[in-house]
Image (cartoon, rainbow, N blue to C red):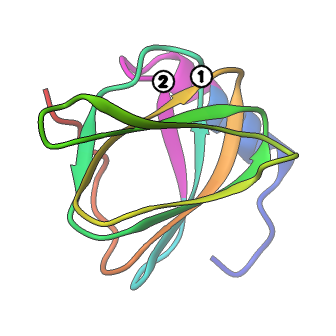
């Protein structure tokens, strides 16, 4: 993407997120590393695992990142917002990212961009 993201694009993505089962929609920025703006609504988040690290940098709103151990016991909980805006999720870590309020954040992962997927 070579142009700024407009307020309308973010608003539209937040509306799309409101209509998805897990409350997420994204605006693609580029690949390798994959970069996108994630827009999310406050709904229960699925637990997921990505083989590589993930970097989250808040733009607006609040999200909660929960990390889980090998037996799916919660090991860490982090609230991300304007006062605590950046968090790196270690690779191969089971985690969830849940919007506390409508939220927008930049997410960066190594490798090619992949479609959104969630473990069930």
Image coordinates of residue 19 in percent, x first then y, are 48, 16
* Residue 99 sits in quarter: top right
Asked if residue 21 lies in the magenta stretch, the reply is yes
Task: Tell whether 114 sits left or right of 4.
Answer: left
Q: Is residue 20 above or below residue 9?
A: above
Residue at 48 percent across and 24 percent down: it is 23
The C terminus lies in quadrant: top left
Q: Which mark is residue 23?
A: 2
Asked if residue 62 lies in the magenta stretch, the reply is no
Q: Nearer the viewer, residue 108 or 7?
A: 108
* Residue 91 sits in quarter: bottom left
Q: SS for tag 1?
A: loop
The N terminus lies in quadrant: bottom right
Task: Tell whether 7 sits left or right of 106.
Answer: right
Q: SS for tag 2?
A: loop
Residue carrying label 1: 41
Image coordinates of residue 93 in percent, x first then y, are 27, 54
Q: CA distance from mark 1 to mark 2?
A: 5 Å
Q: Earlier in the sequence, mark 1 or mark 2?
A: 2
Q: Neighbour class for label 2 at 10 Å: few (<14), some, many (≥20)?
A: many
State yes or no: discs 1 and 2 in contact (Cβ < 8 Å).
yes
């Amino acid at each position: 993407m070579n142009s700024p993201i407009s307020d309308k694009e973010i608003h539209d993505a937040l509306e799309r997120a409101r209509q998805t089962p897990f409350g997420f929609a994204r605006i693609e920025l580029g690949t390798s590393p994959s970069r996108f703006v994630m827009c999310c609504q406050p709904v229960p988040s699925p637990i997921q695992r990505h083989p590589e690290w993930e970097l989250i940098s808040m733009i607006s709103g609040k999200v909660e990142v929960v990390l889980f151990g090998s037996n799916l016991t919660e090991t860490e909980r982090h609230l991300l917002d304007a006062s605590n805006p950046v968090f790196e999720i270690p690779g191969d870590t089971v985690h969830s990212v849940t919007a506390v309020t409508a939220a927008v954040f930049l997410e960066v992962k190594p490798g090619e961009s992949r479609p959104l997927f969630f473990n069930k």
